[in-house]
Image: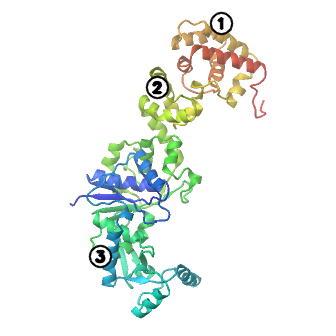
Amino acid sequence: MAEVRTRFAPSPTGALHVGGAHTALFAWLFARHQGGKFVLRIEDTDEVRSTEESLGAIYDGLNWIGIDWDEGPDLGGPYGPYIQSERLDTYNEYVDQLLGSGRAYPCYCTPEELEERQEVMRKRGLPPRYDGRCRDLSEEERRRLEAEGRKPCIRFRIREGGTTVVNDIIRGQVGFDNALMGDFVIRKTSGYPTYHMAVVVDDHLMQISHVIRAEEHLSNTPRHLQLMDALGFEPPQFAHLPIILGPDRTKLSKRHGAVNLMDYKQQGFLPEAMRNFLALIGWSTGSEQEILDLDELVEKFRLEEVSKSPGIFDLEKATWLNGEYLKRADAEYVTEMVEPVLRQAGLIEADLSPERREWLVKVVDLMKERTRLLTDFVSWARYFFTDEYPYDERARKKWLRREEVPDRLDALAERLETLEAWNVDSIEAAVRGLADELEVSAAKVIHPCRSAVTGQTIGPSLFHLMELLPQETVVGRLRRTAELSRAGELEPTDGEG
């Protein structure tokens, strides 16, 4: 078998979206599973919308989820250049070949004329397509149109009858009626090739063995097959991936969550969790296993197991999966990931001392099993980093408005202030000792204490989190909360009594 070569060929006209990342991942997994090569090619033939900023965003997105490439614009390779705008002379050679063979011809129709004629087709209930007006112009007619100042594009001559069959690894055989396609543009009036022309030439010259792309390109494939045949190219194998829908089975959009892949980084997702999640959209191992590391994904991936049905982008499942990754991850690694999040929120300083970072690792280790996103550390663990934290509604209602709580908090503060050793055992002994002295259950001291020190009623072990806070900070928070409670400033805010 010849070497497997797949590619990802994005247009640098915006951020790397979830759909593009999904396509890149599947093409990458297939190449890695087969021991082949994965190529990054930039399709910037949309000369108006392509930008360097978008190119950088593509690199950032792929790097973030761990997709590397063997050949590409930044690495080079035996079939470069890997940016289409640097390959214009190559495309023109093949356009000239098609013109010479009669499989292509110049078209002088203006955009206004095309739209007018297609509107007539729509009104007649016909699919709008090019009507072949310039298909068989004489040399005299062409000279006349050029004398009018018309600059032609170049169209490919589709076969007039019959069916073009696409053999697809995922979908099997799919037939397309040639009569419904219409002759399509392969070179624009600007001199740039269209997507159809450039992709066919590049896939051939770069020896791409498998074209793995989104379902939306399936209808383009019969055009590409006819182009390949006219140019004498051996077609690659095709696999068209299922479309991605939201949980409501409508087209994925911002209302289902972010569409830009890197927005998920900002929301606190780990790259390996997002990669795992994307891999499971439209594909499964055939078992109930849902958490797969990189090696497992590469080992188990099969194109034949990709579903024809639309994949569902379920943000709740992605969040759950991220939480599972956080639980399993090493605390040092999670700390590395969460540091920029905390820094951006203004909760930690730019340069942590070794002692401060060691403390942060302990905080992360305590909290990571109770978080689902890195951003949860900003909200749920805020009390570790600042005294400016809110008291949640449940803390106010259930504990902090009780008449006896201020005195208990003051009494606890006095006990904790005199502790010579600040550790879990001594803190726990002080809290439980106060409960015994007051002849109340330990919960009636523990819960007000948690509410005062963290502003929350749930969280990790109270004694372990208190150990990670300075002794004077805990004492100060207990006394501050007692004072606020006596002053009636911690009453519930929703009117419930």
Q: Residues within 10 Å of mark 2 (few under 14, many from 20)?
A: some
Task: Identify the secondary structure beneath mark 1.
Answer: helix
Q: Nearer the viewer, residue 488 or 300?
A: 488
> Tag 1: residue type?
Glu
Give the answer, above or below, for where 157 lies relative to 308: below
**Is residue 199 at least partly visible in the picture?**
yes
- Residue designated by label 1: 437
- Residue designated by label 3: 231
Q: In the picture, residue 267 is in which quadrant?
A: top right
Task: Mark 3 vs mark 1: give the one in front.
Answer: 3
- Lateral position of residue 353 relative to residue 432, left or right: left
Task: Identify the secondary structure beneath mark 2.
Answer: helix
Residue 429 screen position, x and y as percent? 56, 10
> Which badge, 1 or 2, is on the more N-terminal residue?
2
Task: Mark 3 vs mark 2: give the one in front.
Answer: 3
Q: Cα distance, mark 3 to mark 2?
A: 61 Å
Q: Cα distance, mark 1 to mark 2?
A: 36 Å
Residue 66 screen position, x and y as percent? 38, 45
Residue that appears at 67% across and 30% down: 392
Which residue in the rendered view is the most extreme toward the left?
1
Give the answer, above or below, for where 84 lies relative to 348: below
> Tag 3: residue type?
Leu
- Lateral position of residue 361 relative to residue 255, left or right: left
> Which badge, 3 or 2, is on the more N-terminal residue?
3
Q: How many marks?
A: 3
Q: In the picture, residue 462 is in which quadrant?
A: top right
Residue that appears at 28% across and 58% down: 5
On residue 361, the disc is 2
